[in-house]
Amino acid sequence: MTPLEHSTFEVPGATLSLSYSDEHGHPVIQLHGLTSSRDRDRLLDLDLGRGLSGTRLLRYDARGHGRSTGRQRAQDYNWETLCDDLLAVLDHYFPGEQVHGVGPSMGCATLLHAAVRRPSLFSGLTLMLPPTAWDTRKAQGADYLSRAEFIETHGMDALLRAEQLNAKPPATVGVPDTVPDVPIELLPWAYRGAAASDLPTREEIAQINVPTTILCWVDDPGHPVSTAVELTRLLNDAQLRIAATPAEVSQWPKHLCDDLGLDF
């Protein structure tokens, strides 16, 4: 297996940290969720590309997350801007190629925006934990704004203590506790950018015409099954898999391999 090559990529207002594993196969881009990173997703068992062989796998930390830099500007973290970053990365690393996209939550949203903007870019999508959208997005946005203000007033430790009171989805039982992989001075702005974001319209998503697998789990208000069901209804070629246990989530890397036509 070719060792991971770590590098950086410049986008307006940020330096992105990337990892690239070249095994001379199909190009795959893997994203992560809000407040997470490549490293944190691995701890959360959401790194579906871990151990993936026979592909050219590119992963990067979104601006302001993980080892990437960022600015104190809400607009930098909205999903349209993150889509700009994704398209720039793909044009540089996989010019003229169709890519398979995989990612949870914010990463899922970024991929959907890119698929709407560049319909021929993707050969397929593996969308994990679709976030709140459309009718459910307003309340989630208000929660993100409250978190931003809470952090600036009370600090990160107080936020973590408050979040420990929230029930966790049953499919995440046994996953270690982690903290946001975003610098404290940028985290409120990342929340504000997310609060101002939404998925593309239903009409736009209905125009996406690539094979898509949607992976979600139950009892997670920030990633409701209702969004996953609606995406499955809207997309032209989509299948939905709903997890209720950690054992079912452990099969998600196999679903990615199936999507890519690879052995697990």
Image (cartoon, rainbow, N blue to C red):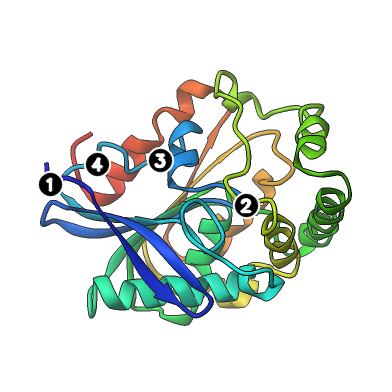
* Disc 1 from disc 2: Cα separation: 31 Å
Amino acid at circle 2: Pro
Q: Secondary structure at mark 2?
A: loop
Q: Secondary structure at mark 4?
A: loop
Which quadrant of the figure contains the C terminus? top left
Image coords of residue 15 (percent x, y): 44, 68
Residue carrying label 3: 47
Image position of 126 with respect to 11: above or below: above
x 59%, y 32%: residue = 178
Numbered circle sitting on residue 52: 4
Give the left or right position of residue 155, taking residue 259 as reference: right
Q: Earlier in the sequence, mark 1 or mark 2?
A: 1
Dividing the picture into quadrants, the one containing residue 216 is top right
x 65%, y 44%: residue = 225
Is the C-beta separation of discs 1 and 3 under 8 Å? Answer: no
CA neighbours of label 1 inside 10 A, class few (<14), some (14 to 19), many (20+) = few
Numbered circle sitting on residue 243: none
* Disc 1 from disc 3: Cα separation: 18 Å
Image coords of residue 252 (percent x, y): 40, 36
